[in-house]
Amino acid sequence: MCISLKEITADNWYECTKLSVTEEQKNIFPVPVVYWMAMSKYEYNNQLELFAVYHKDLIVGVVAYGIDPDISAPWITTVMIDQKYQGKGYGREAVKYLVDLIIKRHSCKKIIIGHRPDNHVAAKLYESLGFQKIELKEDEIIRCLQL
């Protein structure tokens, strides 16, 4: 599978804003991609790294991570594959690629990821990639990949 991650820039940001999830998934992933772009700049002071997920030359999704200052660990904040490209393994490959990128960029002992309790697809994916459940909140399950 030919998956790559490229930073979201002036050249690809608009195409990323066209990505969306299915109607049923909007209760799990309720905000559009443009929200993550704005959040990375204004709420996280450019500390959130956003990447377009490419399959060959086609943008199929978006992933993002940042360093959580409270625990000094990378936190994967966003994994979103457009509704037209779900079920093809792109999400799995994108998370694996992002984990490898984080490991190369940061000296860390763990990577954190979270998902909504009713997002069973994410739970299965993250568990299969080695992320273990460490905390259950009312609106989020927190998982950790020990490195």
Image (cartoon, rainbow, N blue to C red):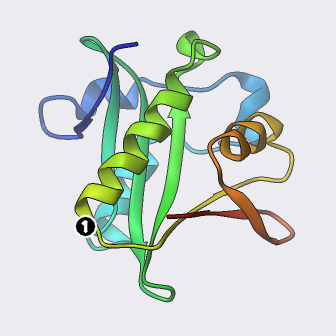
- Of all residues, the one furthest to the left in this rendering is 11
Q: Which residue is mark 1?
A: 46
Q: Position of residue 115 (x, y in %)?
A: 70, 53
Q: How far across and down, in percent of the image, does residue 144 sit?
A: 63, 65
Residue 11 falls left or right of residue 76: left
Q: Is residue 48 above or below residue 109?
A: above
Q: Quadrant of residue 21?
A: top right
Q: What amino acid is labelled 1 in the image?
A: Asn
Residue 12's x, y, as percent? Answer: 21, 29
Does residue 61 appear left or right of residue 107 in this picture? right
Q: Residue at x 25, y 34 (%)?
A: 13
Q: Residue furthest front?
A: 147
User: Which quadrant holds the N terminus?
Assistant: top left
Q: Nearer the viewer, residue 101 or 51?
A: 101
At 13% from the left edge and 37% from the top edge, which residue is drawn? 10
Q: Secondary structure at mark 1?
A: loop
- How many numbered marks, from 0 up? 1
User: Does residue 73 lie above or below 94 as drawn?
Assistant: below
**Which residue is painted at 34% across and 58% down in the image?**
103
> Quick one: label 1, few (<14), some, or many (20+) residues within 10 Å?
some
Residue 81 visible at all? no
Q: Residue 17's quadrant in the figure?
A: top left
